[in-house]
Amino acid sequence: MTEIIDGNAVASEIRDGLTDAIETLADAGARPGLATVLMGDDPASQTYVNMKQRDCEEVGIESHHVDVDGDAPSEDLFDTIAGLNDDPEIHGYIVQAPVPDHVDYRDVIRRVDPTKDVDGFHPENVGRLVAGDARFRPCTPHGIQKLLESARVDTEGKDVTIVGRSDIVGKPLANLLIQKADDGNATVTVCHSRTEDLGEKTRNADVVVAAVGVPELVDGSMLTEGTVVIDVGVNRVDADTEKGYELVGDVEFESAEEKASAITPVPGGVGPMTRAMLLYNTVKAASMQEDVTVDLP
Ligand code: GUN
């Protein structure tokens, strides 16, 4: 039987654990605050940001949101960032990607106070992660580690193939999984658009993580019996539905499920974990800034 890894259930456990930490902070007179910044009106980004706001309310994190006009100059976004850096009620914030083409996202990230960078994207935080001393693990890779733990997948000595080399998922996940740590110790292969024989790399893996943004790229023919499959993709494809589209992952679920020992669905797999780990990082940021020790889940 293939285990369907239930991201909603694991995320709910994380949120329960965070509620206790938030109570500890409240007892010390501190309420964690998270801000989301959205430049432009990308509909998918709006949906993500709305969900993040709702998550905050559910666990007792004060949420703030700033919209920046998509046609505004970069300086308007930079001013918003400077304001959030100076605001003691904001313990963490994210600038939702993608930003409009005329804005350089790297330039944006460099302006975020690294102690408030709950995405974990600032070069200082990337460097710390690579050095094995992460301040904030990026939310999606951290969520994947928690999902693997929940499915009792020990990565030690395993071959993990990651399809996708993004700064948000592929690169940080590879760095986390090679760490000398209980949730690391894997042998990691990172594949990308120039990889010559993708199927060979995925068939050789004990764990395949698909994070490339190509609908249903990985199918059952590319997997060996018993592989653990983590699907990070959330792709809108045209469909005859009320909204005119449906969401599919980077994995063709039906054929992959036949081979996998465990697999994450889309939706309901990695997505809820990304959101839960953003709350986790916000609580961690508040704990550090307020100098209150909390137990994190
Ligand atoms: N866009 C897609 N994923 C993410 C994320 O994890 N953080 C931010 N800031 N933007 C995103």
Image (cartoon, rainbow, N blue to C red):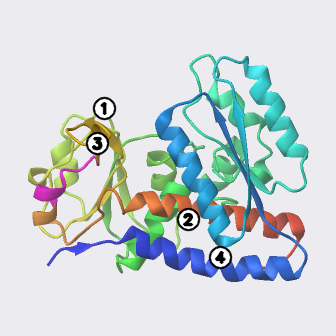
Amino acid type, callout 3? Glu
- Could you tell me how far apart the alpha carbons at marks 2 and 4 are, in whole angstroms? 9 Å
- Whether residue 149 is in magenta: the answer is no
Instruction: For residue 138, say whether it is visible.
Output: no
According to the image, label 4 marks what residue?
18
- Circles 1 and 4: CB distance less than 8 Å? no
Q: Tell me, for residue 193, which label it has, or none.
A: 1
According to the image, label 2 marks what residue?
276
The residue positioned 35% from the left and 47% from the top of the image is: 233
Instruction: For residue 59, say whether it is visible.
Output: yes
Front position among marks 1 and 3: 3
According to the image, label 3 marks what residue?
242
- Circles 2 and 4: CB distance less than 8 Å? yes
Mark 2 vs ligand 1: CB below 8 Å? no
- Could you tell me how far apart the alpha carbons at marks 3 and 2 are, in whole angstroms? 28 Å
Q: Could you say which quadrant of the image residue 102 lies in?
A: top right
Give the magenta-colored segment's residue range: 248-256
Q: Residues within 10 Å of mark 4 (few under 14, many from 20)?
A: many
